[in-house]
């Protein structure tokens, strides 16, 4: 095995370990929420969806998407293919987290607000993010040349990042409300300590899972790029 | 207190399926290469 | 700065002259706008929803779709004749290239809108004499935003495999904020409210335009340069 290929292998292995830890973390938080966290009186059991929904939302909106955009911008400056590889991996993982938000959100909304989809400001923003990311993936798939693909992805990423605050503002304007800050704890401004702890564990698990997924995806892409480079020779 | 535990179970299960599903997809890609 | 603008105008003029010579794009975009308006008319029940309530949405959806269609042609001409490489080799500042394309696209889309608006008034039987100034201003500002993002995206998608499908897929999320702002501005105008009441919406539109036009000009070189 050449040094380069074993390098990709070790990244993949590291990603596997981190992902496993992340998955265990998420499972652990679910157990914590189910068994050891108080039930919210007005919302009932369904409120506990919060401990999975909010960490996923935070990771997608504040970690995964900005990481993709920043890596892209750095690529435009430094032209390092590793940055593009990271941006692509982060974008794909963002899509997964957005999906979790968009699925758990309505499941939470139905018993609480009576409707599956209410064009809630935050969920709508996540929906847009989802479509931006889908567009990103679709565009990448349609470009053959890796350098061009990297440049265009960076441009799209940068424009997407700037779009997010505009979407946030205009959705709230559309609903006739004042823009609310996208806080970590929606609704209840002061969580009892046990709930806060579970939420923070949930956040930690989601972030760990993000790092694991991105590492794994990056390693897979690295292995593929190296194999293609070797074939070309 | 409303009885909506069913929704909670559904949400946790679906979230788990999405996370696990993506993991499995990545594992299969890693194995193939 | 003045030179840049003059160069952009020359490039835009070349583009528009080419379009007007064949006229097919303008005609298809105008026909498309008319058809969308007709379909909207038949897709609603006039007894159920008042025309005035639905009118702003109909107008802006039509404008949005027609704009995307009109911008699809964006860099197609150059690509087909490999003329773009020639343009890039010439010592033309990239900003001028972008602005030239932008102005041409803007003029083109405004032309389609100028055809769609009277049709809209005709089909939906509206009296917009009081709102016309504000409406035109809103259309100008919204179009400036659409075309800024549309121009840079059409430069990107022109070389991809499914260009005509890719442009709307990428562009539509970016069109939503100006769309929301435009509708928010149009509804009071149609209801007879004075322009002074919708100034906030127009200001946000202008901010969107400035931000994305600047961003597009800054990022365009990354799209066209190797």
Image (tube, helix red, strand yellow):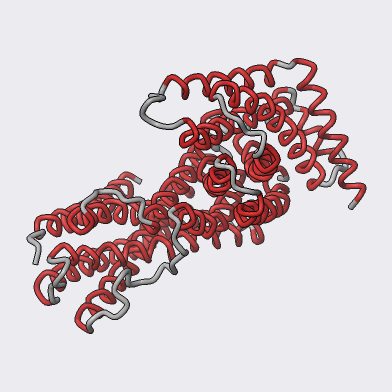
Asked whether the viewer can see residue C141, the reply is yes
Horizontal arrangement in the rendering, residue C61 relative to residue A177 (left or right): right
Q: Is residue C208 above or below residue C25?
A: below
Q: Is residue A46 above or below residue A91?
A: below
Residue in view at x 48 percent, y 49 percent:
A226
Residue B7 lies, in percent from the top left, at 14, 55
Residue at 47% over, 22% down: C41
Q: Is residue A136 left or right of residue C126?
A: left
- Residue A72 image point, x, y percent: 57, 57
**Horizontal placement of C193 versus C100: left or right?**
left
Q: Quadrant of the C terminus of chain C?
A: top right
Question: Quick one: A205 or A172, which is closer to the camera?
Answer: A172
Above or below, A28 against C23 in this view is below
Residue found at the very far right of the displayed protein: C3
Give how far across and how far down residue A191 sits, in percent. 26, 79
Q: Residue at x 31, y 65 (%)?
A: A54
Q: Nearer the viewer, residue A15 or C82?
A: C82
Residue that protrudes farthest toward the bottom in the picture: A193
Image quadrant assignment for residue A184:
bottom left
């Amino acid at each position: 095995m050449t040094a380069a290929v074993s390098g990709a292998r070790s990244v993949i292995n590291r990603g596997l370990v981190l992902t496993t830890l992340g998955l265990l973390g998420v499972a652990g938080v679910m157990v914590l929420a189910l068994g050891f966290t108080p039930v919210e009186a007005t919302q009932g059991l369904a409120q506990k969806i919060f401990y999975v929904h909010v960490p996923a939302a935070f990771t997608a909106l504040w970690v995964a998407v900005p990481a993709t955009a920043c890596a892209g911008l750095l690529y435009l400056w430094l032209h390092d293919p590793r940055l593009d590889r990271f941006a692509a991996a982060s974008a794909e993982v963002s899509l997964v987290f957005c999906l979790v938000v968009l699925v758990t959100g309505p499941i939470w909304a139905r018993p609480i607000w009576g409707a599956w989809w209410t064009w809630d400001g935050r969920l709508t923003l996540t929906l847009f993010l989802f479509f931006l990311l889908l567009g990103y993936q679709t565009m990448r798939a349609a470009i053959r040349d890796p350098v061009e693909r990297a440049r265009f992805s960076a441009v799209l990423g940068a424009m997407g990042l700037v779009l997010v605050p505009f979407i946030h503002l205009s959705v709230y304007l559309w609903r006739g409300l004042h823009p609310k800050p996208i806080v970590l704890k929606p609704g209840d401004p002061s969580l009892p300590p046990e709930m806060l702890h579970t939420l923070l564990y949930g956040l930690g698990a989601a972030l760990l899972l993000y790092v694991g997924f991105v590492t794994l995806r990056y390693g897979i892409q690295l292995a593929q790029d190296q194999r293609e480079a070797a074939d070309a020779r | 207190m409303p009885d909506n535990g069913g929704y909670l179970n559904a949400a946790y299960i679906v979230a788990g399926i999405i996370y696990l599903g993506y993991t499995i997809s990545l594992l299969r890609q890693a194995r193939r290469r | 700065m003045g030179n840049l603008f003059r160069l952009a105008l020359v490039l835009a003029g070349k583009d528009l002259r080419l379009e007007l010579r064949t006229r097919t794009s303008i005609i298809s975009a105008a026909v498309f706008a008319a058809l969308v308006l007709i379909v909207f008319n038949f897709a609603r029940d006039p007894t159920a929803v008042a025309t005035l309530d639905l009118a702003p949405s109909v107008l802006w959806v039509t404008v949005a779709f027609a704009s995307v269609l009109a911008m699809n042609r964006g860099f197609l001409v150059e690509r087909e004749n490999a003329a773009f490489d020639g343009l890039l080799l010439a010592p033309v500042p990239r900003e001028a290239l972008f602005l030239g394309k932008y102005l041409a696209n803007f003029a083109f889309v405004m032309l389609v809108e100028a055809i769609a608006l009277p049709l809209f008034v005709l089909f939906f039987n509206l009296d917009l004499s009081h709102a016309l100034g504000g409406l035109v201003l809103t259309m100008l500002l919204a179009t400036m935003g659409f075309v800024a993002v549309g121009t840079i995206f059409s430069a990107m998608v022109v070389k991809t495999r499914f260009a005509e499908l890719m442009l709307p897929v990428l562009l539509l999320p970016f069109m939503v904020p100006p769309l929301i702002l435009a509708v928010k501005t149009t509804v009071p105008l149609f209801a007879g409210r004075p322009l002074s009441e919708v100034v906030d919406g127009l200001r946000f539109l202008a901010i969107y335009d400035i931000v994305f036009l600047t961003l597009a000009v800054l990022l365009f070189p990354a799209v066209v340069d190797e």
